[in-house]
Amino acid sequence: MMDTARQRLQEADGLAAVLDAAYEAFEGMLSVIHPVQDPASSLFAAFVMAAASAADGRNAVALAPSLPRHPLLAVPAEQQPWSGEPPERVAEMVAGLSHLVAERLTQAAAWSPDTGDQAACRHAAQSARDVCGLLSTGP
Amino acid sequence: MTTRPAFGDFLTAARDHASAAVAGHQADRSGEHVQEITDSLLHVITVMGRYLHDITAVPGGMRSRASPPLTPWGQARLTARDALTHAARHLQEHTWRTRAPGVAARSELARRLDAAAAALTAGRDLLHTHLARDLRGARQFRSEWGLVVCSPAVGRALLAELAWLAHQIAPPCLDVARSAGSPDTASAQRGLRAACGRLQVLSGSVQAAHRADPVSVADRDLLLAIPLNVRLPRPLLDGSEPVSSLYDAVITSAERARHAAWATGAQPAWSPHLTADSLRHVAATSTVTSHHCEILLRSLAARTADTGTAGLSARLLRAADAAGRACAGWLNLARALNQVDTDTMRHLAPTAGEAADLALCTGRLAYADAAWTLSSGPGHQPRPPQDLVPQPGDVPLALAAAHHACDAMTSQAYAQRERIRTAASAGRLLVPTRSLPDTMDIPRPFAPALPDHVYALLRLCQDTAEAAAEASAQAGEAAVAIRAPSRHLTAARAAARAGRGASTNSRRPAGPEPAVTDHPREDAGAVQAALHRLGVSSPDLLQRAADIDQAGAQLIIEAAGRTSDSHAPSDPRTASRPHQPASGYQHEPPEAEH
């Protein structure tokens, strides 16, 4: 799922496609973070806070006037289950994806002529940066 | 340590002055100072009378109905009030009130009485910082301590203290009244003697009540622990704090979080603070805090395993287990809240900041990493038990920190439930339409949350609150066992619950829901509460009432969900009281003044 989301973000062309891919990326983050929110993990607090930020980001994108009302592309069913990965690996993947989301949304905010889209992109990009900051293990 | 003045500070001062009056009154036996002693005793009696008025307020609705038989304490209150009234009359006939304010009396006894009166006045002012009156004169609470201040348990403890003071100050004043005086002072001495007799009546009636139904040590401790209602400064941590400072930081941030929860538990539906972002962040940070509570309690259990206090370690382990369940509850709630939004976004209420502060402070205490933050990555290890409690004497304060945090989590969970209920009833709880089935073609980015979703959220809040309350109760039992400073928290919840019950029995509408120290209405809607007020105890009738309440709440939520234009109510007054007509869960009119 992370790979698919990353690919869609990278290939998204135009504001609507970027918003659609970002929305699905945030949803994807939530779906992979929730199963690894284990209190026994040293990443527990980071995952809990990251999920809240991902939800903030998704809801910010949902307010963008240019977001298509329905997903442009359904995620292939065989890629939806995404489990079994260790929490550290999940954190790494989600951090990478959120970094990309932040980049694309920041770019989209600059392109967009609509102030509503600009605000939504900026807010969602900030949420993506929050997720990235929470789950990045590097300095 | 950041501490607030407490009622005990002033009561202790008054007791000290009363004791000193007994010890040092020999010089006043001549009767030379009878006039200024009369003035000073009247001062004390006036203040005591105001206390009595506070705790013997008879609900107006009871006057026209048959009163229930008086309890020993009820009888003592009335006797005490009458005694003080008569004592004041005896003294007023002879008082000159010639001493200007700030001018010290010449006699030691009068000076001590003046000082005791001043301390009592300051103590009463402190209690009243938790109470207020609205424009109609009806009582309102200004803090989570309001119900405690008005509770029967605190009233009894207060009356017992007043009786002790009366018992102390009456003999030296009586000595002055009986001493050889001049013809000029004879009348004043008679008045003083009569007043002292009334004080002895007061003391005797309270002692009789105490013999029949003793005031517990816990209730007295609770009275003494009532703090000044003032906002504590936010704890700022730089990573260099010793562990003892972290105990204080946790306690302070827990008290701030508890007060914020109380304040927001009754916020109106139109409040800009009522946002999904806030709900989500409170749930997320509370998940983390509950996890920290579990770590702290397990560490404390390990540290106290061989202290010799019977059952302490096992009790702490039970508290840790309950904190773990609360953590799981908060996590489920956080996940559910990740699926919703509100019509106001990108705004975090102060309560979210307080919850985050508590997570940070508990994390600094729970982990070995002195610089731990919510955004710290993996690799942080729990603080070893020996570091958490360097000396055995630190156990009470360490436990108090964990107990305060658990208690704040309980308050947050109940307040969270009220926030969600308020938002849902106003149609402000939304879900992204992209998350709905394709068959629901809604031309807007968000739609009202479905009733099933709302009920699931409320159920999660309830489950979480119950688990948090259990953790707090278990930690409270441990606190009582070792006389930790937080032991009054358990008594405070019990007292507030009793205070709520007394209010309900008085046929008056209850005050605003205290989201912190008492949540008795969580199981009773308006109809059920009405039956309680009527004295109905039949399980069948109460169950039917509960069913009606539940159906009413369901109807409101469904109606709100169908009303697409209800997101911005045109009348803020009606919007602020979404439940009042049918369920009255939270925004009932405050208590009427009798």
Image: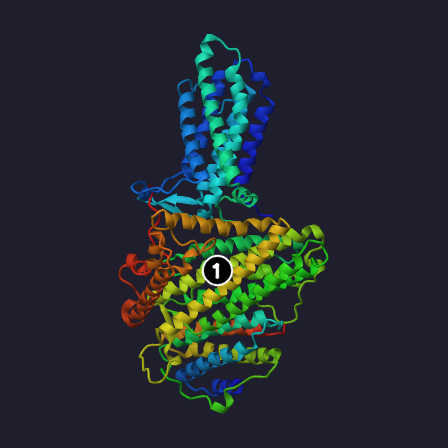
Crowding around mark 1 (Cα neighbors within 10 Å: few <14, some 14 to 19, many 20+) is many
Give SS at disc 1: helix
Relative height, residue A53 to residue A67 (above, below):
above
Q: Chain of mark 1?
A: B
Q: Amino acid at mark 1?
A: Gln
Residue B523 image position (x, y, % from top left): 41, 60
Image side of residue B103 versus residue B590, left or right: right
Image side of residue B311 versus residue B234, left or right: right
Front residue (pair B153, B1): B153
Relative height, residue A16 to residue B594 (above, below):
below
Front residue (pair B443, A101): B443
Residue B451 image position (x, y, % from top left): 36, 72
Identify the residue shown where x is 38% and y is 60%: B539
Asked if residue B473 shows in the view, the reply is: yes
Residue B86 image position (x, y, % from top left): 40, 25
Relative height, residue B201 to residue B313 (above, below):
above
Residue A33 image position (x, y, % from top left): 53, 77
Image side of residue A86 versus residue B460, left or right: right
For disc 1, the marked residue is B412
